[in-house]
Amino acid sequence: MNGFLLMWFSDKHELQILHSLFFLVAHLFGSAGNFIIITITTLDPQLQSPMYYFLKHLSILDFSSLSVTVPQYVDSSLAGSGYISYGQCLLQIFFFTGFASSEMAILIVISYGRYMAICLPLHYEIIMNPRKCTFAVAAVWLCGGITGLLYIASMLSIRFCGDRIIHQLFCDVPQLLNLSCSNDHIVTMGVADFLSAMAFACFIGIVISYVHIFSTVLRMPSAESRSKVFTCLPHLFVVSLFISTGTFAYLTPASDSPIPLRFYSLSFTQYCLQLSTLLFIV
């Protein structure tokens, strides 16, 4: 077998169908919510500021990330086959890691935008002009593409030993590393460590920006001015949730249990991203 076998949620076909239908309904609601956000931020003339421009791309990334894993899982569940080819697996890794990296990058850009709006309001229009916002979004998508290519390039050197069974509902990098032979995974681990270090540096940058934001807001004389801090809470909630669930999903030891903890935690994060985006607009 040139591909892999994705471990099911349950050996009972009825429970498997019920589980897949649950994720299908959740995916449809999530897709509808993201579509509404994208439509509103595109057509409403009052929502054309840089913040809403970034939120629109966050919704696009959220929708794309959900579409990488859920539809394939639902299709294979209803078909009664957990087989996924080697090429499909690599493509899934490319898009999933790429979109996840882009989501982290767009959260950083949004954090920078909030910092400029609160701490340097007089320079906001100059720095956050349409040309620079377009450049920032292009850099976000480029960052995701480079991340996906790095993972794919490192995965091509891996040889797999034994049964090609993935205890997950989608092709996951840690699970594939468990199937690798001897030291074939060293390059992939190096890529993962490098990207993790970059993500941690970005997280530190977000923390520093919010330290400046809160210190600036607390020095404002009026209560109305200090209320600006509430506009940052949805983004702060998104960042905290994104980092905490990602850490839980990938720093816990890989297990042979078929219970898809990573799938649940990452899907939960994506739906909360959508909810927080709605809070931004409201």
Image: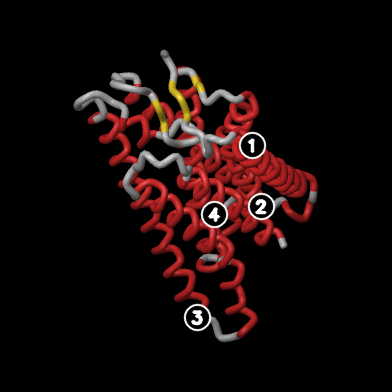
* Residue 52 marker: 2
Left or right: residue 237 compared with residue 74? left
For mark 4, does the 10 Å Cα neighbourhood hold few (<14), some (14 to 19), or many (20 or more) residues?
A: many
Mark nearest the camera among 3 and 1 is: 1
Which residue has dot 4 on it? Answer: 110
Which residue is located at x 37 percent, y 48 percent? Answer: 199
Label 2, secondary structure: give it.
Answer: helix
Q: Are marks 4 and 3 in contact (CB under 8 Å)?
A: no
In whole angstroms, how far apart are the C-alphas of marks 2 and 4?
A: 9 Å
Label 4, secondary structure: give it.
Answer: helix
Identified by mark 2, the residue type is: Tyr
Q: Earlier in the sequence, mark 3 or mark 1?
A: 1
Residue 41: percent from left, percent from top: 73, 48
Identified by mark 3, the residue type is: Leu
Seen in the picture, residue 107 relative to 68 is either above or below; the reply is below
In whole angstroms, how far apart are the C-alphas of marks 1 and 2?
A: 43 Å
Which residue is located at x 70 percent, y 58 percent? Answer: 281
Q: Earlier in the sequence, mark 4 or mark 3?
A: 4
Seen in the picture, residue 63 relative to 1 is either above or below; the reply is below
Residue 53: percent from left, percent from top: 65, 48
Label 1, secondary structure: give it.
Answer: helix
Q: Are marks 3 and 2 in contact (CB under 8 Å)?
A: no
Which residue has dot 1 on it? Answer: 14
Q: Earlier in the sequence, mark 3 or mark 2?
A: 2
* Residue 218 marker: 3
In whole angstroms, how far apart are the C-alphas of marks 3 and 1?
A: 56 Å
Residue extending farthest to the top is 1
Mark nearest the camera among 1 and 2 is: 1
Mark nearest the camera among 4 and 1 is: 1
Relative depth, front residue between 16 and 222: 16
